[in-house]
Every structure is written in C-alpha cells, then in structure tokens.
Image (spheres, rainbow, N blue to C red):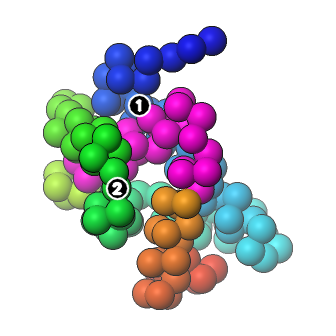
Amino acid sequence: MENNTNMYSPLSLAFLGDAVYGLLVRERLLLQANRPAGRLHTLSTALVNAAAQAKAAKSLLPELSEEELAVYKRGRNAHPGHTPKNQSEGDYHSATGLEALFGWLYLNGDMTRLRTLFDRIWQNGAENGESNGEAK
C-alpha cells in the first residue's frame, strides 16, 4: 500500500509520531538496563514530554534536510486547539513538530533516518545526563 505521506495533516502525523517516539524511548530504556517497570515508566515520562521533546527538536534542527524541516515546521505551526497543563505553548508546538517528523519518517518507511535522528537526540541528552538511565 503506497502512502502519500504529505497528504496527512501535521496533527495526524504527530499522533503517530508520538507513539513512535515513545516506543523508541521505551525500547532504549529497556535495552539499557533491567529495571522495574515503575522505574522504566518514570524515566520514560521524563523523556517523553513537551519540554524534553522541544529540547530534542532544537538539537536536531541543523541536521534536518529541507524536506524534513518543512514537515517539522508544518507540525510546529499546526493549531491543536489546546495546550496541556504544565507545558509551555512554545514547547508544545516544538514537540508537535518533532512528533510530526517522526510520524512522517515512519510512514515513509525510513527507519534508518528515524533511528539516526533518535540516536542523535539520545546522544545529546546523554551529554547532559538526561538519557543515561537517570533522567531528571
């Protein structure tokens, strides 16, 4: 089944990308060390939230292709109609852009690029002590 991934709304791409990003974080945390499920959940929620994803997006921007940047901007500029409690509007929009990009890459079947970008995010976080298994 062929998809024209550009026909999906940025919020639909973000819906999928949220799940993809969350799965990548959970996979990395699980493979990193054998921890109790409650600890895995705590670490995951520290890494999968608007503030953390906005920081991740900012670190990736210089590495994105023109097409990837356009998808990110479509997601960032989308109007979801709400901002979750305890999240800044700017962080939420940036996180939505990152999720749209991850959803778009997933639908395009570009798992190599998806993992490359995720690895870059993880490395950038590890330098700040955030993805070394002891997320803030």
Residue range (magenta): 92-115
User: Above or below — where is 12 with respect to 3?
Assistant: below
How far across and how far down the image is residue 63, in percent? 35, 63
* Secondary structure beneath label 1: helix
Residue 104 sits in quarter: top left
Q: Residue at x 47, y 68 (%)?
A: 121
* Secondary structure beneath label 2: loop
Which residue sits furthest front? Answer: 66
Q: Which mark is residue 13?
A: 1
Q: Which residue is mark 2?
A: 64
Q: Mark 2 packing: few (<14 Cα in 10 Å), some, or many (20+)?
A: some
Which residue sits furthest right? Answer: 34
| Residue 83 appears in the picture as rendered | no
Q: Residue at x 51, y 17 (%)?
A: 3
Q: Residue at x 63, y 80 (%)?
A: 133
| Majority secondary structure of magenta residues | helix
